[in-house]
Image: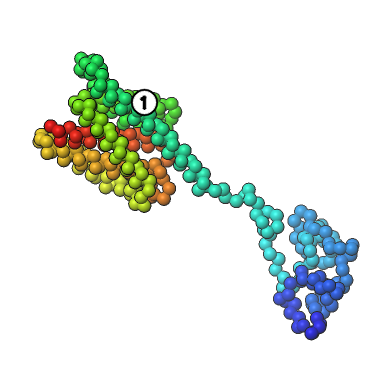
Amino acid sequence: MSWQSVPQYPQYQDPNQQYNYGGGYPPQGGYGGGYPQGPPQGGGYPPYAQGGAQPYPGAYGQGPYGQGPPPGGYAPQPGFIQPPPSAGYGAYDDPEGQPKNFSFDDQSIRRGFIRKVYMILMGQLVVTFGAVALFVYHKGTRDFVGANRWLFWVALAIMIVTMLCMACCESVRRQTPTNFIFLGLFTIAQSFLMGITATRYAPTEVLMAVGITAAVCLALTLFAMQTKYDFTMMGGVLLACMVVFVIFGIVAIFIPGKVITLVYASIGALLFSVYLIYDTQLMMGGDHKYSISPEEYIFAALNLYLDIINIFMYILTIIGASRD
């Protein structure tokens, strides 16, 4: 079948394919009679458009409004729809204009945030358990504190004020070095109070409580990092349990006894163990529903520190009550 015998459909053919034939140019009748015979003047294709000029009726000369030659190629024929221009060069977009990999950036920021929180937490725990060891094993320290009872009330006031300031005032826990100053004062005051409390127990009981607390906290932290269960949605439930626990503690003051002490301490250790999982997942972020801002590293360290300290105190209370 010859080329001329193929039925022509001018309204559906792409005029840009008209020079794809090796034997010259198709006859004028195949394109509606609107295209001149022979190749363009000048020994090649028309020059590319300058300044993004739009096509206009006519040949390749200067238009009546001063436009440049038509953009890159041939004059559009009837039935041809010019595709919209793509961004960048050719069919590829500029890689600098694409969105960056924010997920990688978020993960990097989150990992740095976790490292900072655990470094701060490690420093707090070293100071606290160092103070506990000093009070338990050094008789001169115990005698000095026993002779100066007012130190207990000063430490208690500093602990409460600094904790409330960091918990309630965003500017205090986010501005450096104010946040580190308040956290340092809180840690020192809390360590002093922990040391005084630990003097009520035997050194072996304190060492046993420290070991159990370290094992429990490590296991709970690994569980919080590996489990598929999301504990960040339990904030309301934990708050309600904490309110009931505080009320139960007030009632237990007026009902002394070994059994009530063991029950209260066991519930407290369990509650703050769940809080440790909750605060760890808040710090981790990722696939959990809620997460803490990376700017709140002081607040995150404070939460984890209070969870660990409370777990230690309730385990120490269980050990002491079981041996009485």
Q: Nearer the viewer, residue 76 or 90?
A: 90
Left or right: 304 in relation to 34: left
| Quadrant in the picture for the N terminus | bottom right
Residue 290 picture location, percent across and down: 38, 47
Residue at position x 35%, y 31% in the image: 166
Placement of 315 over or under 236, stated as above or below: above
Q: Nearer the viewer, residue 196 or 208?
A: 208
Q: Nearer the viewer, residue 58 or 88?
A: 88
Residue at position x 76%, y 69% in the image: 16
Left or right: 222 in relation to 100: left
Residue 90 picture location, percent across and down: 70, 57
Specify whether residue 322 is in view.
yes
Residue at position x 35%, y 34% in the image: 302
Question: Looking at numbered disc 1 in the image, what kind of residue is underneath it?
Answer: Gly
Residue 292, image quadrant: top left
Pick out the residue farthest to the right: 42
Left or right: 91 in relation to 121: right
Residue 260, image quadrant: top left
| Quadrant in the picture for the C terminus | top left
Residue 253 picture location, percent across and down: 13, 34
The residue that label 1 is drawn on is: 184
Placement of 9 over or under 187, stated as above or below: below
Specify whether residue 197 is in view.
no
Residue 291, image quadrant: top left
Residue 29 picture location, percent across and down: 82, 79
Residue at position x 77%, y 60% in the image: 71
For the image shown, how many numbered marks are present on the structure?
A: 1
Secondary structure of the residue carrying numbered label 1: helix
Q: What is the crowding at mark 1: few (fewer than 14 residues within 10 Å), some, or many (at least 20)?
A: some
Left or right: 265 in relation to 233: left
Q: Nearer the viewer, residue 243 or 316?
A: 316
